[in-house]
Amino acid sequence: MPPITDLVQIRRLGEQKRAENLRFRAHIKSHVFVERQFRKAALETESQIDCQDCGECCRVGEVEITERDVAKLGRFLGMTEKQFMEKHTALDENGLTILRRVPSADGVLGCEFLSGNECTVYEARPANCERFPHVVRGAGSIQSRMWEFVDRATYCPIVYNWMEKIKGLTKFRAGIKGN
Ligand code: SF4
Ligand code: SF4
């Protein structure tokens, strides 16, 4: 079956399945699984979905950046690190440095480097963006990071479809409590 990529549908289904996905998280944490099968399923899902048709994570999420990201982006844009910091970054509510967010032409807030669904600094994008949605490329085991994916399944087609796929692999019985 082809993956679901329509963002309205993903939002609706991800929210509808939030409680089920929380139970799935508990299921994953309380059983032993071969991690490799989860990464393999994520690679398959990633290969079926084109992020350039989506860009939703660039609208939904704030992107925390490092000094290394600032140096790389500054070089890419022909700016000093100081200029980059002043022009393109902000602080989040915890005082962490994030990429500046601005409303698009249709009023939707998102990363200021997003144009339509495309990243205008793609070659120099921050490590956080490169690794997103942090399924295949994430620090720590997938089992220990399942909490991250319940929310992401409400907006990211890769995460939503991947979670549905691995529910089958782990014999999780959707809709049945006490798996
Ligand atoms: S830098 Fe690019 S990939 Fe990262 S959030 Fe902004 S537009 Fe998206
Ligand atoms: S990572 Fe997910 S939300 Fe981001 S562009 Fe790709 S499919 Fe869309």
Image: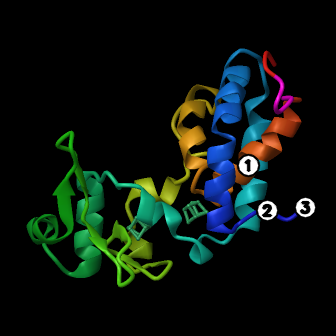
State which region is magenta: 172-176
Q: Quadrant of residue 24?
A: top right
Mark-to-mark CA distance, 1 and 2: 9 Å
Q: Amino acid at mark 2?
A: Pro
Percent x, y of residue 128: 42, 53
Image check: 69 left or right of 35?
left
Do the CB atoms of the residues marked 1 and 3 lie less than 8 Å apart?
A: no
Percent x, y of residue 87: 14, 72
Do the CB atoms of the residues marked 3 and 2 lie less than 8 Å apart?
A: yes
Image check: 145 left or right of 125?
right
Residue drawn at x 46%, y 82% as measured from the top left: 116
Image check: 150 left or right of 83?
right
Q: Residues within 10 Å of mark 3 (few under 14, many from 20)?
A: few
Q: Amino acid at mark 3?
A: Met
- Mainly helix, strand or loop, the magenta region? loop
Residue drawn at x 87%, y 36% as measured from the top left: 169
Mark number displayed over residue 162: 1
| Image quarter where ligand 1 lies | bottom left
Observer-nearest residue: 94 or 43? 94
Q: Which residue, given by chain and number where applicable, does mark 3 sit on?
A: 1
Q: Residues within 10 Å of mark 2 (few under 14, many from 20)?
A: some
Q: Amino acid at mark 1?
A: Trp
Pick whichever of labels 1 and 3 is earlier in the sequence. 3
Pick whichever of labels 1 and 2 is earlier in the sequence. 2
If the image is split into quadrants, where does the N terminus sit?
bottom right
Mark-to-mark CA distance, 3 and 2: 6 Å
Q: Which residue, given by chain and number where applicable, does mark 2 sit on?
A: 3
| Image height of 151 relative to 34, above or below | below
Residue drawn at x 83%, y 25% as measured from the top left: 176
Q: Quadrant of residue 30?
A: top right
